[in-house]
Amino acid sequence: MVEGSRKMVSLLFVLSLFSALSDAKLSVTPTKGVPWPMPMDYKTTGKQNTVDAASFRFTTRSVECDILLDAYVRYREAIFGRNADRFHAMRQSPKFVQMFSQEGDIGEVSVDVSKPCQGSYPSLESDESYSLSVANGQVMISAQEVWGALWGLETFVQLVYKSDTGEYMVNDTIISDKPRFAHRGLLLDTSRHFLSTRNLLRNLDAMAQNKLNVFHWHIVDDQSFPYESMAFPELSNKGSYFPESQVYTPTDVAEVIEFARLRGIRVVAEFDSPGHTQSWGLGQKGFLTECYSGVKPDGSYGPADPTLNTTFPFLKQFFAEVASVFPDQYIHLGGDEVSFTCWQSNPVIKDFMQKMSYGTNYAKLEEYYMQNLLDIINSLKRGYIIWQEVIDNGAKVRPDTVVEVWKGGWEEEMEKVTKQGYKTLLASCWYLNYISYGSDWTTYYTCDPQKFNGTDAQKALVMGGELAMWGEYVDDTNVLSRLWPRASAVAERLWSPQDVNYPLVAEPRLIEQRCRMIRRGIPAEPVTGPGTCPVEYREP
Amino acid sequence: MNAHRWNAVLLYGCVSLIGILSLGKGEIMFIAERLPLKGDRTLSDVPWPMPEKWSRDNDTFTVLPSSLKFDSNTECDIIDDAIRRYRDVIGLFKHDASADDSDITKVEISLGKGTCDEFPYLDMDETYTLVTEMDKVVISCKTVWGALRGLETFSQLLFEESGKVWMRNWNISDKPRFSHRGFMIDTSRHYLPLSIIKKHLDAMAWSKMNVLHWHIVDAQSFPFVSTTFPELSDKGSFTPRHVYKPEDVAEVIGHARLRGIRVIPEFDTPGHTHSWGKGKPELLTPCWNDGEPMRAKYGVYNKAENFDPTKETTFTFLQQLMSEVKDVFKDEFIHAGMDEAHYMCWQSSPNITEFMEEKGFNGSYAKLEEYYVSRALDVIGGTGKNVIMWQDPIDNGVTVNKSAIVEVWKNKRSNIDCAQNSVDMWQEFASHVAKSGNRMIISSCWYLNYLCYGEDWRRFYACDPHSFTEKQSEKDLVVGGEACLWGEFVDGTNFLQRSWPRAAAAAERLWSPSHVTDANTAAFRLDAHRCRLLRRGVPAQPVLPGYCGDYDYGFEPETPSTSEPCGTNGADTDSVRFAVTTKVLIVLLSLLIATIP
């Protein structure tokens, strides 16, 4: 029996990899039953246990809640397939249990959560740590909060693999785990192309399989406004691509939020303004700045118009609705890429600039807009995440503001932002919409968000990061296959210890993770070169 | 003028409005507001690929898909099946099936020769004309293949508006610019399920491509099940489930034939044959390292590589396999590969050296390659088939039989160079092949596996297969081109998405006249085509921001059962079921035994 720590396991991977390489790298042998992302502390042995499919059950040791009960159903299915449920009724019979439970070594996973969790919603401060032990035929998951227990369950499911003879196996393992970063996000853009609610849910499943915990929903933009507002229904009636089918109704949004919550995932909605708002203008007349050509409006529109007395009352009412619909403590306010050309052309704005003594500094006007918007959000008792430009332009924001860095030269920017004492998120390295040939996951994998010049206190302000799949060239046809498992590389970077960072070592595990995701219904594409999965993807 | 025609005239007042609305069904948009799209949006109702000659006016006619009659003057399963398919395709248009009036009541297919060819072939006649007459659409053609292309065009002329299906008054005369319009799939690096290959063939037919080049085996796996040598796939496939059995291959060929698509298998030798060695180790040349055979040299060669040309048994084997292959695949061509026969392993082997001395090759490995190539081509020639092969032997100075078609695949531009101003650099290779006088297929500029961010279809669209020469005699050597999607990074999860509509750019280049080159205008038509593919069930990826009207991929069927997010696989379910069934049986048996006194 070989016992190994995480590092020893890594070493074994490297060795097995070299033996594969000597075979001219025709294939890399995937791991079996090793989790992704790699836990903080992971000890496993060669002692195998069989998992008894028929009697298998999850039991709650102390605190029970909706989140756990839902997870048990999902995870039983994740291990044994959809039919697992059919045997549930059979399992109720004590005779049945008695008769069958001897067949496998492990028939029960017991889950111990300390804090009450009924109806909980995750937050930036959630305790996601857990411990997991598979030993002496017992499986035990303990966590302070239910969020840790969820990840423990996910890890357990990943420890289970199938033997060559088709039995479910799990090796004796001791894990003590917690994420390196609290904010591990994924951005989807539902404006450039509409994404069906069904695919948003499938993606949340995929996120949970990789322990990502924030769905950053870039829900509207220039191209379309699919969010159906109860207060301003015209926004989506006029601004969506197709109001009959390409909108998110209040029911859809609630479904996404609940589905995410049950998986320990926060939903942070982004309503980007004052730029990126062309589609708002279709349903909310007088919100956008009229652009002028000479002395006349030329029929086109620019960013939101901060000079009108209707703008901020509208925003106040709109964001009050957003705050009531999205329970998360943060709202993403965008604030990126504001073009000044239209503002510059508009005589009313020019007058306003003079009145406010801004001269020709339109960044001041942008700051004015943002400041008013931030005050509104403040009054709604919500925190906000903003793209880096808002800080770059010198707006004064709440001290608990999270600044998302997305441009090139992120090291300097992170240094600057954290020096000012703001919490920050990195996205620059992880624009997954920019595709290129081959195994590009390795570049995502090796980008470390704390690798910039700064004090420990500055580094501690890094809350994590987000990968982005902007929607220009992505819709329901390709969003999932383009995301996964490339996004898994980011997920491990944000979860696992800093020194888990060798792509060659990770590769056999990434292959297993992709095949596991395929088995669980996600069309994760091949990213490591030729090969196969035991089970090929089939459209559900 | 009959009543239907009056109808059309009465509608004339709102005709231009109808045109615009219908174009709004597939709508691409700017990336940023300051970058409005260029090009002529009004051409987006012209079929893809653009016909050789066409005209339309603003008269519109209603068509009732459910009661539309298709008449053909020829008995032929290809025509019958096509009519059935296109009935389904046009049935996808949303319309009120109970409406009783329809201007167009019939599609008449008139075949000149009245023949029904068995299988499609190189230089088959795909010409057709399509005209809208008083109450019917007439497709005239010389062969069934022309009829298929005409039907496809017809299906693209229809559009839905206000609960009805319409078409304008068209007059089309069409034929392809090149006869060989291929797509190469690679089922060795990753396996492609049959359902995906068949959907892909559908998309090819809808884009008027006519050759499936099936790179069926390679170094990584051997999924082709040979009845003569079953050990090749028994040992060489990824798993026993990752294979193409004879009935699978027949299904692909049959599906392709009905769509006017040739299926050309590629059995690539002497290189790229690692997986063959699993079932038949004796085929490969043992490589030498440190004075020992069967020793790999990392990064240079494996333990054994390349077919061993010194053994007569190699050619006997090839002869036996090819005599099976010639019957399985119906096309007159077999692709023999012949690319990247790296010499390093051969160079390491004393046996090879000895053989070369015997043959008087004077240390020239090109001569050895030539020896293999000519013997292998003789073997294939002996089966009665013609050969296609990659350009490599020509590059290496090997003399190649004039009857062979050479596929040009190399490109001096870096594969990962995505700069907008970078140009394809394959012309000198084509020019070199032209000197040898062989006919050729161009694929260098259509390597779909090399992807770039954004509208990379524009690069495929810009490539002209004649651009290597000014001489007509050299241009005439080009039989066509192929889009290639090598399989290193594609499988069932992303194959169709990555292929379409990018391959459609190559399809138009190979079908439409050389002057159809305005990509800005083509973008709108390509988007319309992608939305068409979506509607017909192919998950073609977007070309720009936007949407496809009231339909997008995955919208239907919207039943509660499909909203379950997590799929599972059959094997798992089956094994659970099996395990439980077994247990139940055991229990019943033991109960039974217990009751026996």
Image (cartoon, rainbow, N blue to C red):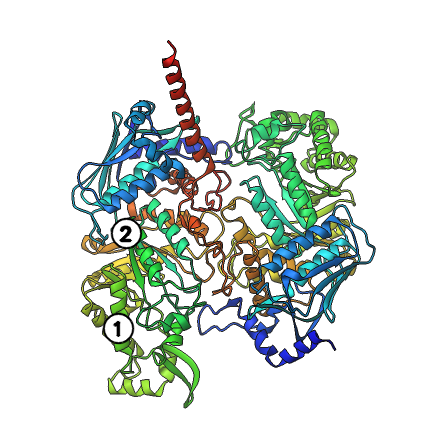
The label on residue A438 is: none
Number of residues whose C-alpha sits closer than 10 Å to that of mark 2, classed few (under 14), some (14–19) or many (20 or more)? many
Whether residue B501 is visible here, answered yes or no, is no
Circle 2 sits on which residue?
A261
Determine if marks 1 and 2 fall on one subunit. Answer: yes
Whether pointer 1 and pointer 2 mark residues with C-beta atoms closer than 8 Å, the reply is no
Give the quarter of the figure containing the N terminus of chain B. Answer: bottom right
Chain assignment, label 2: A
Q: Secondary structure at mark 1?
A: helix
**Residue A217's x, y, as percent?**
34, 60
Give the quarter of the figure containing the C terminus of chain B. Answer: top left
Whether residue A125 is visible here, answered yes or no, is yes
Chain assignment, label 1: A
Q: Residue at x 47, y 44 (%)?
A: A526
Circle 1 sits on which residue?
A317
Q: Amino acid at mark 2?
A: Arg
